[in-house]
Image (cartoon, grey):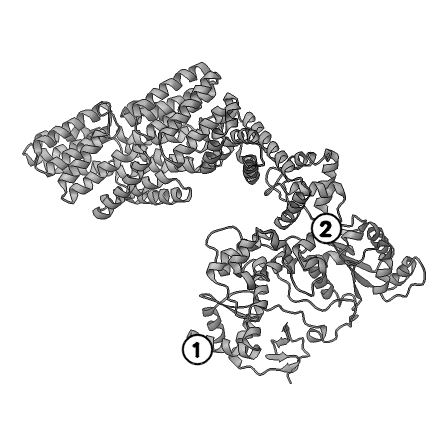
Amino acid sequence: MPDTNEQDSVIAFGPFRLFVKSRLLEKDGAPLPLGGRALDILIFLAERAGEVIDKRELIKRIWADVNVDEGSLRFHITTLRKALGDAGEASRYVVNVPGRGYCFTAPLLRPAASESRTSPPAASPSSLPSPLAKMIGRDDAVGRISAELAQHRFVTIVGPGGIGKTSVALAVAQGELAAFDGQVCFVDFGALTDTRLVPGTIAAVLGLTVNSEDPIPDLLTVLRSRRILLVLDSCEHILDELAPLAERLVRETPQLHILATSRESFRAEGERVHRLFPLDCPPEREGLGIADILAYPASQLFVERIAESLSEFELRDEDAPLVAEICRRLDGIALAIELAAGRVNAYGIAGTASLLDSRFSLLWRGRRTAIPRHQTLSAALAWSYDLLPPAESATLRGLSVFVGPFTLEAALAVASCQGISEPEAVEAISNLLSKSLIATSPTERRLRYRLLDTTRAFVADKLVENGEADRVARAHAEYFRDFLHDIALKSTGMQSAGGFLPYADHLPNVRAALTFSFSESGDRTIGVDLAASAAQFFLELTLLTECYRWTRQALASPDARAADSRKEMTLQAALGVSVMFTQGNNEGVRSAFTRSLQLARGLEDLHWQLWLLRGLHIYLTRVGDFHGALGIGEQGESVARKLNDPTAMLNVEWMLGVAHHLIGNQDKAVRFCESAMVHNPGSQRLNIGHLGYDDRIVALVALARGLWLTGRPERAIEAARYTVREAELLEQPLTLGISLIWTIYVFLWVGDWDNAEILIERLIDHSARHFLGPYHAVGIGQKGELLLRRGDVAAGIEHLRRSQATLHAARHRIMTTVFATALAEGLASQNQPDDALRTINEAIAQIPDHGESFDMPEMLRVKGDILARSGSAVEAESCLRESLDLSQRQCAVGWELRGAISLGRIWREAGKAGDARDLLAPLVGRYQEGLQTRDLVAARELLGTLN
């Protein structure tokens, strides 16, 4: 028999004891034969219990000096499982995680003192419950509480029902047996209803025979002579009697230590409160695998409890996110997690997750041996709820209307509809917090409160039972209507950005308030007002689909007709923005903006007029009506003059600059947009719906492109990079998307394919993550253009056609001619001149107003190249001359250089080398920078051949 008297470490689980140093496995005290490799595997897995051990790591550890395959590992795992019992039992201990490895999931028991020490102290066999299974995620708490107990003598573990207070207290008590020479007594007050029996209950546990009506003097006499730890469990319902007694015992018996568990603190002199928090849960994040979720104690507990009841349970990768969701939904409450795990046998993991929304989940039963109040979640919560005085129970019922975090002001507004005065409600909330029925949710700005999901579900049923649900929901909706309205007023309406962003955590409550208001039992008048107040809130958070849903519903309501002009103006404006960015540039956008602008003029609200003109300006640029956009900018100029506001004038200048760039007046575009390079964080911008359609960023985009077009490629690159950096700082999806879309062309134009590719891939990913459909289509088209430049013509054409189809359906016309031009070039290089010519002619035909568009010179150049390829030199030359003339009128030196290169090549072939040189050389000479960019390199090469 191995010598186990040298503090051999012991791992105990079920009927087994594993002596690591002695390499001995016992079952029910008898040695159990087990092969060396299987024993090595068991020791390694048990020492890292709860952790998924990769198969390769396990093989490397067990067969350090031998090369073996996974078959050997599986063989010894099978041997180990057989030794541990039949298949049903063995699966409790060693779980196979497909594709990953193996995990030891059995509850580990603390070894008896005789197994881990040479001379153990004897504990009273009846004073402390038997050692518990290994707890999960509470080792740090046990250590801290033990330290606090040694220093302060009176520690109370506080937390909501089912969080594991008793288990932690018992673990601490077991660890303190040696320190107290076995003098640890456990007093369970859970079943005690008569508070007069509190002193007698403690005396009975201590083994005292009390012969007087007042046992306290005898208690004090005994406790003064003994060093002892009293564990007082489940004290919340007898605190009025127990708190003064505990305080007196600690004060008058210097060797006594008290460890208590309660849902609220004793508020006693000398008490040290240790609040027990829920088990850590996996975050709400995509791509969580088995190893990821098993790094969190809540998931470990859930999986271990399933393995105890399901003999062949193996956690699969596809179930990992569901396990994470279940643990989060149950707020990391140990009892709730154990009860949910017990349902997996009947419903599976997916079924259990779907049932969490059901009120029946509160009635799921746990272990038969559990105390009655822990056998269901409902019983655990009822225990706390039934102890509340009327004002606190009514307040708690009202708080169930909140979804997620809420403020004290919001709670008081709801409590008032319950007939509870503000002082009463403040006191009730404080008491509910101390009783662990309300949790705090601190943020950077201010303290928030919340109900745990299980608590909220329980008291929501009580709210319905008391017939209070509609009254409370109405008060909740009215509060958020007024709350959002006040923020809108402070933010001066849609004219300034960011006013709503600090209140993003109210989003779930705003949604709930809107849902109730437009329901059959709600009040649509409140709903219309709330939708108007919430419109800007949704836009600032870039929740475009929700903004569209609620503004449309509000405007369709008969109550909208009774709404004042300002509310309708707000709703129409938000509708126009949300439709434009979610459904495309249909006539509904123009109609909504036009109606809103009409109302703003009737109200003589110049700020709103300017903002709405900005919205129309964006719409007209997106549908390709660049002259219409210029006209809107000129209207904005008139409004800005009336406002006599330099910031408004600056915004209007940027609107004009963007319109001039798109029309083709590049010198004016640069002049109007140069001021955007000066960052003025204090300036107020006409951000469209605060979505991040930031005027300064749009102006910077036009400036960067205008700089390239006017012959300053290095400055253009510098401005493009600055634009993207500035857009990133705003953290607004649309702004960043816009900056990427338009600056990508600067890199394409200069021939920097690598940086263009980086930005294009970023745009595609960004637009997909933020559901910006047209922007995603633009990214696909730009990828096609890059593929063409790199020689992958077939793939480039396919990308461009996909992009064109999507943009055409969304009426996003600003890019269609650009992509058609690239597509025509690709078709021409594939020897499809007829298709190429038809494509470019259709693109040119889309441009009204005598060809005034920023890309018309380039379209004419590409048409000239296609004609030249087809042998139509005369027509080609005519086209290219037209391109050059238009480039000069637009001050677009970049297009002019390209046209000159194309025409120079034709003249070279026609024997007009001198004419070609005279055309090209002065243009190259005008460039003072960017001499290594693509077009300038091509121009100098052509000049070399001409010389």
Q: Is residue 711 above or below residue 131?
A: above
Q: Secondary structure at mark 2?
A: helix
Using a 10 Å C-alpha cutoff, classify the residue at mark 2 as few (fewer than 14 neighbours), some (14 to 19) or many (20 or more).
some
Dot 2 or dot 1: first in sequence order is: 1
Q: Which mark is residue 66?
A: 1
Left or right: residue 513 compared with residue 843: right
Q: Residue furthest top?
A: 642
Q: Is residue 695 above or below residue 368?
A: above
Using a 10 Å C-alpha cutoff, classify the residue at mark 1 as few (fewer than 14 neighbours), some (14 to 19) or many (20 or more).
few
In the foreground, 813 or 310: 310
Q: Secondary structure at mark 1?
A: loop
Q: Residue furthest right?
A: 212
Q: Where does the C terminus fall, quadrant-wise? A: top left
Q: Which mark is residue 527?
A: none
Circles 2 and 1, Cβ within 8 Å, touching? The answer is: no
Residue position marked by numbered label 2 in the rendering:
384
Q: Where does the N terminus fall, quadrant-wise? A: bottom right
Q: Residue at x 30, y 23 (%)?
A: 627
Q: Residue at x 43, y 38 (%)?
A: 733
Left or right: residue 508 compared with residue 689: right
Q: Is residue 626 visible?
A: yes
Residue 605, image x, y percentages? 48, 18
Residue 173, image x, y percentages? 74, 63
Looking at the rendering, which quadrant does residue 778 occupy? top left
